[in-house]
């Protein structure tokens, strides 16, 4: 399957996840977010940019607990987990990982 962002065709799997995380851009993220019914705001971008930086460094999608720690350190404190799931109400894997351009994670903690 493919999606078109601007004039670029992006390969996605049957569930809408990028087949190649290297195809990700902020324009792709915005397009993926629209398919999830989300309008990306500052809090979303904070999570997505952290996830992309983690991916670039480790070549793997960050587990939700790392994102929760990041949000806590950025001021969400004890409410970090709730904040993550407020930003991405259908879940970390279903929305945050998809919009951040990760392949669908399988078999690990979602927070």
Image (cartoon, grey):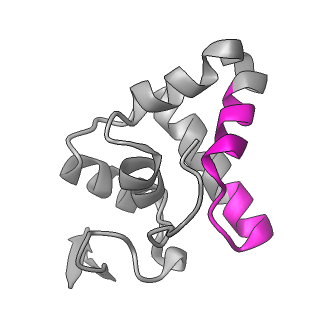
Asked if residue 2 lies left or right of residue 66, the reply is left
Could you say where residue 76 lies in the image, as x and y percent from the top left? 65, 16
- Number of numbered tags placed on the structure image: 0
Could you say where residue 101 lies in the image, as x and y percent from the top left? 47, 65
**Of the pair 104 and 22, the residue shown nearer to us:** 104
| Depicted 91 relative to depicted 73: above or below | below
**Of the pair 69 and 23, the residue shown nearer to us:** 69
Identify the residue shown where x is 74% and y is 33%. Answer: 69
Asked if residue 36 lies left or right of residue 20, the reply is left
Which contiguous range is marked in magenta?
A: 53-71
Quarter occupied by the N terminus: bottom left
| Depicted 94 relative to depicted 105: above or below | above
Identify the residue shown where x is 28% and y is 56%. Answer: 31
Q: For residue 63: magenta?
A: yes
Could you say where residue 70 lies in the image, as x and y percent from the top left? 73, 34
Quarter occupied by the C terminus: top right
Asked if residue 108 lies left or right of residue 26, the reply is right
Identify the residue shown where x is 66% and y is 56%. Answer: 62
Hey, which quadrant is residue 72 in on the image?
Answer: top right
Q: For residue 77: magenta?
A: no
Could you say where residue 30 lies in the image, as x and y percent from the top left? 34, 50
Identify the residue shown where x is 30% and y is 57%. Answer: 32
**Of the pair 110 and 12, the residue shown nearer to us:** 110
Name the main secondary structure of what is drawn in magenta: helix
């Amino acid at each position: 399957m493919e999606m078109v962002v601007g004039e670029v065709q992006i390969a996605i799997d049957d569930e809408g996840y990028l087949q190649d995380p290297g195809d990700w851009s902020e324009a792709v993220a915005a397009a993926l977010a629209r398919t999830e019914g989300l309008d990306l705001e500052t809090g979303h971008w904070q999570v997505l940019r952290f996830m992309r930086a983690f991916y670039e460094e480790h070549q793997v999608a960050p587990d939700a607990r790392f994102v929760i720690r990041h949000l806590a350190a950025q001021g969400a404190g004890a409410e970090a987990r709730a904040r993550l799931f407020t930003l991405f109400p259908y879940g970390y894997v279903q929305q945050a990982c998809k919009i951040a351009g990760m392949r669908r994670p399988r078999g690990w903690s979602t927070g």
